[in-house]
Amino acid sequence: MKFENLIYRENEETAWILLNRPKVMNALSMKLSEEIVAAIEIVRQSTKLKFLVIKGEGPNFCVGDDIKEMIKWGNANDITRRVRYYQNMANQLEELDKMTIAAVDGFAVGGGLEITMACDFVIATERSKWGMPEVDVGITPGWGGTTRLARLIGRRRAKEINLIGALHTSKKAVEWNLWNRVVANDQLDEEVERLLEVLKSKNQQGMRQLKFIINRGVECDLYTAQGFEVLSGALTGAVSGFWQIKDADQGKGVLGFTAKDGLWQTRRRLAKGFWVD
């Protein structure tokens, strides 16, 4: 697919999405947002790719939605549809079975900050700034600025960020558990490569499982989250070769259905009419 507002490239197991509207600080036009959705879908469908890095071309990561375009969004229903479209974009990014890294330089505000919150890791330069200034435009965030943000830094701080609209340092983002690491201004690419080297050394199936159970577990009660941990532990054992359980079907049920063999016939005969009156 040919992109006009972003640069997409692959290097072995790593995909790169480079937001490419540097003259407007990589503001998310409708066109750019559509291209991000398409690029994420390419990554999602790939079984070769294991990692994704998102970065901004030029001196900034992303300043969020292109405010000048908002008048084109349409009426309240059209706005609802577009916001849900952007939410789906962030959800698809967060749900990727790949490890995702946001490499931040300059401004990451509004929708730009929301992109970082949907990634697994965020590395930022010392000069980077972040915030949710929508309040001063008279609008509210739509795809993470109140929801994911509150889950990451807490309700009280999320209110501070949204209701005041100030811009904060990358150091504070790390202190508040919003981002992972701050590096010197000229060390961003090197630190991304260092992190990729570490991640590439891991058991990739284990990484996928960990990402899944952490993302899902944080949204539910403790006992349900522990259930994910238990099942993940069992799956880890199975894919490591310890899959045979004496009283499990080991595929016989599926094969029996296909062949309509004695196992299938017995089970259906016993179950089909049981307690149906």
Image: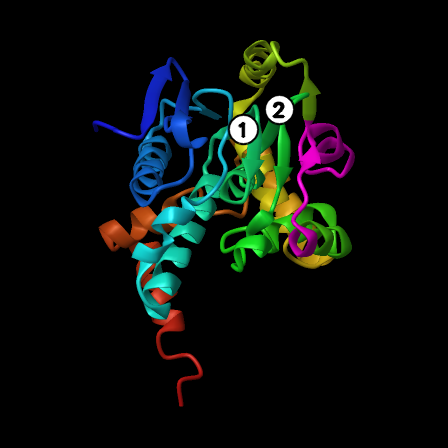
Q: Which residue is mark 1?
A: 102
Residue pictured at 37% horizontal, 62% vertical: 79
Q: Is residue 242 visible?
A: no
> Which image quarter holds the N terminus?
top left
Mark count: 2
Relative to 267, is 197 above or below? above
Q: Secondary structure at mark 2?
A: strand
Left or right: residue 204 versus residue 271 is right
Residue pictured at 36% horizontal, 37% vertical: 36
Q: Find residue 69 and report its horizontal and vertical position in percent.
A: 34, 49
Relative to 152, is 189 above or below? above
What's the amino acid at mark 2? Ile
Would you say residue 192 sits in the magenta stretch? no
User: Which segment did they paint magenta?
Assistant: 162-180
Q: Which residue is mark 2?
A: 123
| C-beta proximity under 8 Å, tags 2 and 1 | yes
What's the amino acid at mark 1? Ala
Categorize mark 1 by other alpha carbons within 10 Å: few (<14), some (14-19), many (20+).
Answer: many
Residue nearest the observer in this picture, 71 or 271:
71
